[in-house]
Image (cartoon, rainbow, N blue to C red):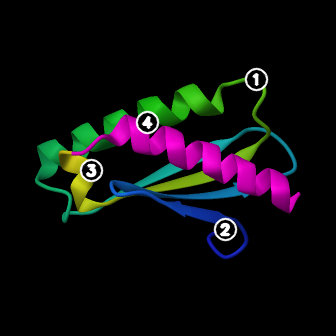
């Protein structure tokens, strides 16, 4: 997936996206120990899960596989803004590639 799709990097995360032929859309999250302790990592995962679910459930979005890798700055950064910007850029690039 990482080789065939698009990658968008922001200060707090990296989004890998790949368009696929049919539903359902899927999302995976990578939050390493570099982000922080277990409490911090789980908080970041919950935030990412919430942000991705809202975007993937939108009716105007085609089916995509999504991998979000949190960077160490995700523990204290502006995760929502970066995810929204990366999501928009990834979809635009997937649309141009299709």
Q: CA distance from mark 3 to mark 4?
A: 14 Å
Q: Quadrant of the N terminus?
A: bottom right
Q: Earlier in the sequence, mark 2 or mark 3?
A: 2
Where residue 25 appears, x then y in whole percent? Answer: 69, 41
On the picture, is 54 further left or further right than 41? right
Give the magenta range: 77-98
Q: Which residue is mark 3?
A: 74
Q: Return the residue found at the far bottom.
A: 3
Q: Which residue is mark 2?
A: 1
At label 4, counting other C-alpha atoms closer than 10 Å, the crowd grade (few under 14, some 14-19, many 20 or more) is: some
Q: Nearer the viewer, mark 2 or mark 1?
A: 1
**Mark pair 4, 1: CA separation:** 18 Å
Callout 2–callout 3 Cβ contact below 8 Å: no
Q: Earlier in the sequence, mark 1 or mark 3?
A: 1
SS at mark 2 in the image: loop
Residue at 60% x, 51% y: name it: 66
The label on residue 48 is: none
Percent from the top left, x then y, of residue 70? 35, 56
Residue 95: in magenta span: yes
Magenta: main secondary structure equals: helix
**Residue at numbered disc 4:** 49
Front residue of this view, candidates 46 and 71: 71
User: Does the CB distance between marks 3 and 4 fall below 8 Å?
Assistant: no
Q: Which mark is residue 59?
A: 1
Q: What residue is drawn where x is 70% and y is 47%?
A: 91
Q: Residue at x 52, y 43 (%)?
A: 85
Circle 3 crowding by C-alpha within 10 Å: few under 14, some 14–19, many from 20: many
**In this orientation, does residue 40 appear?**
yes
């Amino acid at each position: 997936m990482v080789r065939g799709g698009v990658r968008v990097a922001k200060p707090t995360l990296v989004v890998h996206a790949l368009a696929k032929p049919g539903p359902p859309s899927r999302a995976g999250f990578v939050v390493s120990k570099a982000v922080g302790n277990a409490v911090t990592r789980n908080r970041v995962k919950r935030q990412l899960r919430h942000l991705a679910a809202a975007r993937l459930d939108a009716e105007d979005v085609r089916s995509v596989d999504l991998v979000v890798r949190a960077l160490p700055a995700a523990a204290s950064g502006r995760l929502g803004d970066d995810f929204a910007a990366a999501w928009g850029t990834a979809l635009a690039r997937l649309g141009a590639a299709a």
